[in-house]
Amino acid sequence: MSALSELYEEIARCQQCEIAKYRTKVVPGEGAEDAEIMFIGEAPGWHEDQQGRPFVGPAGLYLDELLASINLKRGQVYIANVIKCRPSANRDPLPVEIQNCRPWLNRQIELIRPKIIVTLGRYSMALFFPGKSISKIHGTAQKRDDIVYYAMYHPAAALHQQSLRRAIEEDMLKIPSILARAESVTEAKQQPQQLSMFEL
Ligand code: URA
C-alpha cells in the first residue's frame, strides 16, 4: 500500500469536526501520486460526498474541460480540497475545520511534491497567499520552498459569471508555461508580506 493510500485510511478515520458525523464519504483527494500539478479546491459538495471523489459535480466537469484545454486529463494531475468532509448545506468551511484539516493537506503535499500548486477559489488561496485578494492575484504565481503557487478562481464561481469564466480559462492556459519555467524561476526570499509576485 502506498503512503498516500495509508494517509487516505487515516483521513477516513478522522472525526475531529462535527461535519465528519454527517458525511456520506470522506473526500481525501485523487490523482497521480507523482503529479507535477496539484489543484486544491475548497470543500466537497453533494456529488463529491456521495462518491468520495473531488470535483465530480458540475464544477468538476468544468475543471475537466479546463484541464483538456491544456491537454491534461485528471489522472495526470492531483486534485484535493482544503477540507475533506462536506459542510452541511454547502456552507463555507469554518476556520476550525480548515485548521483541523490542514495537516492532511500538508501531508498530501509532502507525499506528492508537486512542482505547482494551483489554488482554486478564495479558501484555498488564503492558505498560501494570506491577506491577498483573489481578484488581484489570480493568474499570478509565486515560488517558495521549491513549489510554485498559482492562484485561480474557483470553477464553480466561473461557471456562473461570464467575466470570471474568461479569466479562469485564460489563467488555465498559462499553466504549461509556468510548469516549463518552474525550476528556473528564482524564489521570493523577502519577508512574507513583501513576496514579489511574478506575472506570467
Ligand atoms: N468544489 C470544491 O471546492 N471541491 C470539490 O471537490 C467540488 C466542488
Image: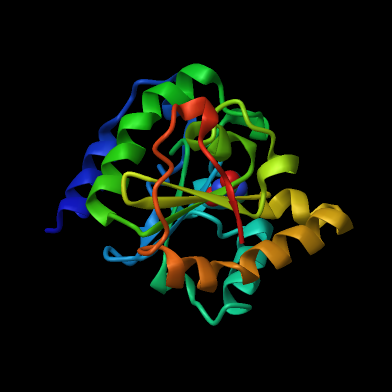
**Looking at this view, is 170 or 48 the one in front?**
170
**Quarter of the rendering containing residue 183:** bottom left
Identity of the residue furthest to the left in this view: 1
Q: Position of residue 86 (x, y in %)?
A: 53, 36
- Which corner quadrant of the image does residue 31 belong to? bottom left
Q: Nearer the viewer, residue 41 or 8?
A: 41
> Could you tell me which residue is drawn at 58 percent across and 34 percent down?
123
> Colour scheme used in the picture?
rainbow
Quadrant in which the C terminus is drawn: bottom right
Residue 116 image offset from top left, x and y in percent? 43, 57
Q: Residue furthest right?
A: 162
On-image quarter of the N terminus: bottom left
State left or right for residue 197 relative to residue 182.
right
Location of residue 75 with respect to 84 vertically, above or below: below
- In the displayed structure image, the side of residue 77 where residue 172 appears, left or right: right
Judge whether residue 114 can be spotted in this image.
Answer: yes
Q: Residue at x 15, y 52 (%)?
A: 3
70 over 106 or under it: above or below: below
Does the rendering let one see residue 46? no
| Residue 75 x/y as whole percent | 41, 72
Measured as percent of width and height from the top left, residue 182 is found at: 41, 63
Residue furthest bottom in the image: 71
Between 5 and 124, the residue placed more toward the observer is 124
Tally of numbered discs: 0
Which residue is pictured at 56% across the width and 39% down the height? 125
Q: Nearer the viewer, residue 154 or 92?
A: 154
Q: Is residue 96 left or right of residue 145?
A: right
Residue at 59% of width from left, 78% of height from top?
68
